[in-house]
Amino acid sequence: MNRLLKNVQTLATAASSFALTVTLASTLAGRPLAAEAQPPTPAPERVYFNETGHTVEDPFVAYFVTNGGIERFGYPITDQFVDSTTNLTVQYYQKARLEYHPANPPAYQVQLGLLGDELGKRQPPLAVRDIPSATDPNCAYFDATGHAVCFQFRRYFETTGGIDLYGYPISAQTIEGNRIVQYFQRARLEWHPERPEGQRVQTAALGTIYFDWARLDPSRLRPTVTNAQARAVTALRMNASVDDPFAPSGGTQRVYIQVTDQLGQPAANIAVQMIVHAPDGDQAYTLPTTDARGATTLLFLAGRYPAGTTVNIELIASGGGLTATTRASYLIWYY
C-alpha cells in the first residue's frame, strides 16, 4: 500500500511539473521578445494651465509630472515665489504646497509642505485601548504620530503614495461639514459616499484652504500671462442684463453683454446674436462684436404687449470655434 501511494505521488508530481512546463512554454511562445529598454520621457521644462492661469516649471515641474500631476496636487493656484518667512521657493496648488530645499540631496530637494500640521489639525495620540492590533487587516498604526489609518482610507493611502505623498496620519477619522475626514501631515482625505465605487476617497483642496486660512497675498492667485500660447482662449463665458426689468409697452429696451474667457479676462471681437422670444413671434438681432473690454450693447424695441407680459431673450456668443449662451428677460409694465 505504501509503495502504491508513493508511486501515485510520484506520478502526480511529474504531471504537475509537465503541466507547468507546457503552460510556461505556451505563454512564452505567445509573448513577444522584450523590447530594448527605453529611457524615461523627460519632464517638460514648463507647463502652463489655462484653467488657473499659472505655470509649473523648474524646480517643481519634474516632481509634479512624475508624482501624480493634477490628480494628486490639483492645478497650480500661484506661480512659484520666495516665501518671506522661510526663504524657500514655494508654489501653491489646489491640494498641496511644493517647497524647494536646495541644501538637501537631489532626490529630496522638492518637498511637500506640512499643511495639515500648519493648520493645527494634529490631535493627541490614540489612547492605548484604541490602538489597533498589529494583526488587524483593516488598519495600519504609526508610532511616529500615534494614529492609525483604516478601511477605505488605508487602501487609498497605501495605493496612491503613502507616507511620501501624504505624510503620517495626525488625526483620527472625524466629522467636518457632515463628511468623514482624516488629516495627514501633508493632506486631508475625505469620504464621499455619493460617488461611484473607486472614487469615494478624495483628497481635499488643502492648498487652497491653507492659502485662505493663512491670509496670504491674494494677488498671487491672479492669472499670469507669459506667452501667446498661454493666452489661448479655451472657453467663453457670457453675462447679460437689461437696462430696465420693467419696460413700458411700446417703448425701448437695452441689453448689455459681457464676454470673458476661461480666466475671466475680457474676450474681444466675439460675435453675439440675440433672439427675442416675443408673444407674436421670435425676433433676431445681431449685436456689434465685443470691444476690448469684452462688452457690447444694443438698443431695441421692447414690443407693444399687454402689461404683465414676460419677454424672454436668448443670447449666443461665438468666436474662435467656441460658443457660450445665456438668457435674460424683462416684464412689460405700465409706464
Image (spheres, rainbow, N blue to C red):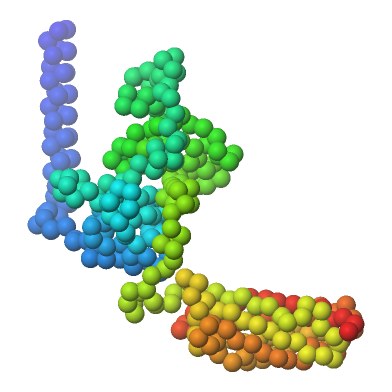
Residue 256 sits above or below residue 192 on the image:
below
Q: Position of residue 134 (x, y in %)?
A: 34, 19
Q: Position of residue 254 (x, y in %)?
A: 71, 86
Residue 75 sits above or below residue 121 on the image:
below
Determine if residue 41 is in view.
Answer: yes
The quarter of the image holding the C terminus is bottom right
The quarter of the image holding the N terminus is top left
Q: Position of residue 71 (x, y in %)?
A: 38, 53
Q: Quadrant of residue 115?
A: top left
What residue is drawn where x is 46% and y is 84%? 320
Q: Position of residue 305 (x, y in %)?
A: 87, 86
What residue is drawn where x is 55% and y is 79%? 259
Q: Nearer the viewer, residue 99 or 43?
A: 99
Determine if residue 26 is in view.
Answer: no
What residue is drawn where x is 27% and y is 66%? 46
Q: Quadrant of residue 245?
A: bottom right
What residue is drawn where x is 33% and y is 37%? 167
